[in-house]
Image: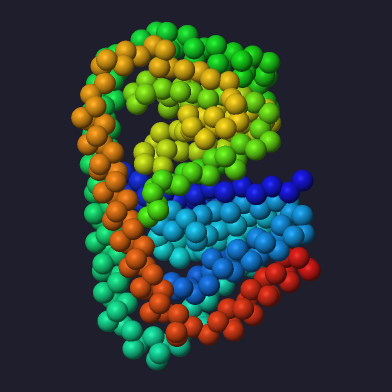
Amino acid sequence: MRKIRRMFPGGNTANGFYSFHNNIIDENRNMLYILKGMPGGGKSSLMKEVGERALEKGYSVEYHHCPSDPNSIDGIVIIELKIAIVDGTAPHIIDPVYPGLKDKLIDLGTFIDSDKLAKNEEKIVESKLNNKIAYSRAYGYFKSAKIIYNIIIENNKRGMNFGKANEETIKLIEKIFIKSRKKAKESKIRHMFSAANTPDGYVDFTHTLLDGISKIYYIEGEIGTGKSTVLKKLMELGKIEGYNMEIYYNPTFPEKIETIIIEELNICITSNKNALKFLPEKINLNNYFDHEIKRDEDYRIYYSLIEEAIKNLSLAKENHKTLEEAYKFSIDFSGVNKIKKNIIREIFNP
């Protein structure tokens, strides 16, 4: 049965742009097409069309969305064929590891008419500069939000009974791993984001990953109640047991785990609220938290900083649109279309 999964290989975070693009497909692949080129050059449209063709033929597809424009695609994976196509341009530079064998580099920049493009040089330079400023401001606000977030954590810890929370963690560990035995293999772990801070606000695709999961555990809790710590413990145990896992991280604080999918057990443990749609088993850490300790003003400041960061991501997106328009009229799209047809033929009619 075909499936559509959606995720983000990169994120706009308190640590700046954070990339998991090298996790889009592993070395056990049949082919990786790496597209290089220019803004507005048709890379995302090409990947979308290949993805649609794969779905029509009954294959499952992963869409890897761009956090700076969630309607744009940074990569696709045709799961059953072990084939991927990715955008290998900055800021998520990807280069061939096995050129000519498992990797194929395709430079769409060869279809630019440099003489036509030169007429827009001033606009391109200005847009690039404005983009840099907007991203710098956005990441500055995210970084400031992290400072307030850490203040909230330290304050909320004072109202948390971690002894009781640890008892809940032990019960959860027993439920998941009690029947498991150590495997004679090394755990394979894939790191990714299921949600992102985007110019359109917070965008979450976690629900596309949970469809078909047989057991979901939802960890509920205020900031600072230890959700990410519980998830980190579970990840470490999963590694010891030799399970293959997908780990999805907090879109603002990429050091914090938000979701774990243990493939062999078909189990998910998550603190993402999207899981509530699937009627999960709940572990509520708020039962051991004194809500009177919360400082509402800290939360207000935190969310206002996130809002300012999003506004600047929106400005960056507008600048990128200007950049795309500056390039479009100088691109030979007939050449891009030929490349697309060749890729489709190679994948589906080898």
- Decide if residue 185 is in sight here: no
Left or right placement of residue 333 versus residue 148 in this view: right
Quarter occupied by residue 98: bottom right
- Say which residue appears at 40% left-offset and 53% top-offset: 200
Q: Nearer the viewer, residue 117 or 289?
A: 289
Q: Number of numbered discs present?
A: 0
Q: Nearer the viewer, residue 205 or 258?
A: 205
The answer to whether 309 is drawn above or below residue 96 in the figure is above
- Say which residue appears at 39% left-offset and 85% top-offset: 117
The answer to whether 255 is drawn above or below residue 161 in the figure is below
Q: How is the image coloured?
A: rainbow
The answer to whether 264 is drawn above or below residue 44 in the figure is above
- Say which residue appears at 28% left-offset and 76% top-offset: 125
Quarter occupied by residue 278: top right
Report x, y in % for residue 35. 54, 68
- Decide if residue 213 is in sight here: yes
| Quadrant location, the C terminus | bottom right
Report x, y in % for residue 324. 41, 74
